[in-house]
Image (spheres, grey):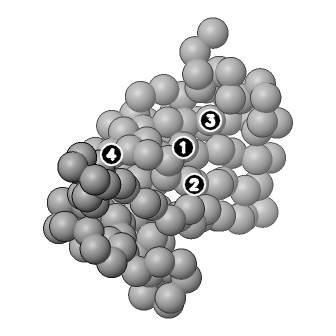
């Protein structure tokens, strides 16, 4: 059972689509229509634009232009902090938005997690 099919069975969604950070469709299952993979890049772009809006409105930590990572006081530009003689890398990410598209035919939820965009159709 693939991860997309597993998510579909556990979530109660009627369709699930997963795409990578470039918008390439990695998998689709359930009721998403024939053009779902053609639109996967649009979903990725949409959730990224929403992330920029969230940062501009002060919702959460300030986000850097290089992908939403925030720096804490005492960190180097690479996100490394010194702990004794060791350098540890810390990447804090905000939760990020869930974009909801609601029509008379149902709802579509779009969420970016790590470098993947997950799209769920709720009918």
- On screen, 67 above or below 7? below
Residue 118 is marked as 1
Residue placed most toward the observer, 71 or 116: 71
Query: What distance separates the C-alpha of mark 2 from that of mark 3?
Result: 10 Å
Q: Residues within 10 Å of mark 1 (few under 14, many from 20)?
A: many
Q: x, y percentage for residue 104?
A: 78, 63
Residue 110 is marked as 2
Residue 16 is marked as 3
Are the residues flagged by discs 2 and 4 in contact, CB closer than 8 Å? Answer: no
Are the residues flagged by discs 2 and 1 in contact, CB closer than 8 Å? Answer: yes
Which residue is painted at 53% across and 78% down in the image?
60
Query: What distance separates the C-alpha of mark 2 from that of mark 1?
Result: 6 Å
Q: Residues within 10 Å of mark 4 (few under 14, many from 20)?
A: some
Q: Say which element carries label 3.
A: strand
Residue placed most toward the observer, 70 or 14: 70
Q: Earlier in the sequence, mark 2 or mark 4?
A: 4
In the current view of this chain or complex, which residue is farthest to the front?
84
Are the residues flagged by discs 3 and 1 in contact, CB closer than 8 Å? Answer: yes
Which residue is painted at 68% across and 21% down in the image?
6
In the current view of this chain or complex, which residue is farthest to the top?
1
Q: Say which element carries label 1.
A: strand
Q: Earlier in the sequence, mark 3 or mark 4?
A: 3
Quarter where residue 14 is shown: top right
């Amino acid at each position: 059972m693939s991860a997309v099919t597993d998510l579909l069975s556990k979530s109660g969604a009627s369709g699930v689509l997963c795409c990578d950070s470039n918008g390439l469709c990695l998998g689709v299952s359930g009721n998403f229509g024939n053009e779902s993979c053609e639109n996967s890049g649009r979903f990725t772009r949409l959730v990224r634009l929403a992330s920029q809006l969230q940062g501009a409105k002060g919702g959460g930590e300030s986000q850097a232009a290089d992908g939403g990572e925030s720096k804490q006081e005492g960190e180097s530009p690479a996100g490394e902090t010194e702990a004794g003689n060791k350098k540890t890398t810390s990447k804090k990410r905000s939760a990020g938005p869930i974009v909801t598209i609601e029509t008379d035919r149902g709802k579509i939820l779009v969420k970016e997690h790590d470098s993947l965009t997950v799209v769920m159709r709720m009918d």
